[in-house]
Image (cartoon, rainbow, N blue to C red):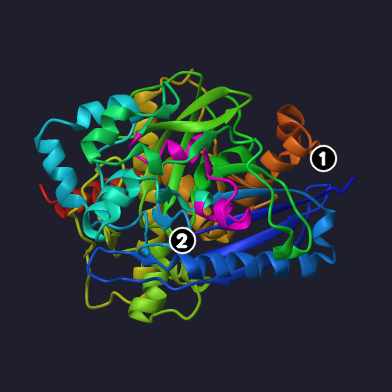
Amino acid sequence: MAGYVLAIDQGTTSSRAIVFDENMKIAGVGQKEFTQIFPKSGWVEHDPEEIWGSVVLTIRQAIRKAGIRASDIAAIGITNQRETVVVWERETGQAIHNAIVWQDRRTAGDCERMKGEGLETLFTEKTGLLLDPYFSGTKLSWLLKNVEGARPRAANGDLCFGTIDTYLIWRLTGGRSFVTDATNASRTLIYNIAQNRWDDDLLDILDIPAAMLPEVKDCADDFGVTDERLFGAAIPILGVAGDQQAATMGQACFEPGMIKSTYGTGCFAVLNTGSEIVPSKNRLLTTIAYRLDGETTYALEGSIFIAGAAVQWLRDGLGIIRKAEQTGQLADSADPEQAVYLVPAFTGLGAPHWDAEARGAIFGLTRNTGPAELSRAALEAVCYQTRDLLDAMHKDWQSDGRQTVLRVDGGMVASDWTMQRLADLLDAPVDRPTILETTALGAAWLAGSRAGVWPGRKEFARRWARQRCFEPQMDDDVREAKIRGWKDAVRRTLTGG
């Protein structure tokens, strides 16, 4: 039986495809960046056709580099940038507008209006989410309102809505499968996470026709089969999860109390709370971690909008570095006497502040501030924001007194300097796994275990391996002083500050 598993990792700035062999080792990788579109300040879009083209290209690259045929692949798992919205014609598959990306803030006014009407409590009780432009629901409502003729066409069943996973499955299966999974559905602002269904009350408020919504499945399920003309064989799609939930499973965080944090364009920390829905009193999100065999596991999540994107800004916006890898060396050489803080609210601040109108700021600049100090400030900002998330999580979820250990993944964790500073500022150990591609691995595990070629949950968790543990080394008084400075910088940045 074919033992290879293909993971599609469709991210915010690039699409990747990774072929894993029967031993869960990487056999081939394809990757392609695609265009970021900024029509107005705070607006972020992607071209769905470009995303689709990049996915097909990278799958073919990965298969070729692995030296296999498509028929050797037992299953496909998909993980994707969440909350990004696509609406397309059921008849043709053509999108009616660019995809509106999770970072997009164009619906901030709509969210504020609904908050003023006292609706946020209802949304939070049903979805676990806050009324913020981050989530899919208000983006979808905006499209239906602003694309001519869209709402009546949607009500007639002529249009389909999906997050990126749904759009890709539709295209991969030649329009035969119109489905999503529970994790992606849970991020739309219109899905009742306790009842596991689309919520009629919320659909009415946002004026979204139910006829345009996909069927919601478990994370490991039968999502359809690819059109064999695409890759030379019909391959079953057996696993789907939003990127942060896929990383949670890839990190084998299957037990309540386990925490992972992924550092990509943004940063996302997820705490497994088991079968318990834990309402947050500290502006975190309550969400679905995964749904397997009909049983739902929940989580608390903290979302930081800007992590690796701050390093991209240093490179592409300011031009003070040529490669992202330079930041760790520069940060290490920074003047320790300079207390420079970067609050990267380029697209607002996420958890636990949720200030859509906040904008980025730098504090503590002197005549001697240069690339080294700015690099340190950008990397430390990620660490400070992670600490804010974990502090909020501990307030919502009463631990049993054991020390928190954070499992980390994503592009930024390759930097030893950043991971050491993270451990120092958290005052907690940070575990970096042997396999850093945990998001793709989680999607692959869903598909591979469903296909019967990869192990189940317990054996998969047993095989998780740590590459290095970073232990805190910073003096308590230094840590406390740095954190006081960060809190002051954030206070000054918030629109109410």
Confirm whether the magenta stretch covers residue 187: yes
Would you say residue 487 is visible in this rendering?
yes
Task: Determine the residue located farthest toward the right in the rendered image.
Answer: 1
Looking at the rendered structure, which numbered label has been put on residue 287? Answer: none
**For the magenta stretch, what is the residue range?**
167-190
Confirm whether the magenta stretch covers residue 444: no
x, y (%) of residue 101? 37, 58
Q: Neighbour class for label 1 at 10 Å: few (<14), some, many (≥20)?
A: many
Q: Residue at x 71, y 70 (%)?
A: 61
Residue 271 relative to residue 125: left or right: right
**Foreground residue, 379 or 57?**
57
**Foreground residue, 70 or 329?**
70
Mark 1 belongs to which amino acid? Val
Would you say residue 29 is visible in this rendering?
no
* Helix, strand or loop at mark 1: loop
**Foreground residue, 441 or 431?**
441
Q: Residue at x 61, y 38 (%)?
A: 249
* Helix, strand or loop at mark 2: loop
The answer to which of marks 2 and 1 sits earlier in the sequence is 2
Residue 261 relative to residue 479: left or right: right
Looking at the rendered structure, which numbered label has been put on residue 12? Answer: 2
x, y (%) of residue 68? 85, 63
Mark 2 belongs to which amino acid? Thr
Disc 2 to disc 1, C-alpha distance: 30 Å
Q: Residue at x 32, y 51 (%)?
A: 153
Indicate the quadrant where residue 26 lies. bottom right
The quadrant of the image that shows the N terminus is top right
Image height of 105 relative to 198, above or below:
below
x, y (%) of residue 136? 35, 47
Indicate the quadrant where residue 42 lies. bottom left
Tell me the residue that label 1 is attached to. Answer: 453
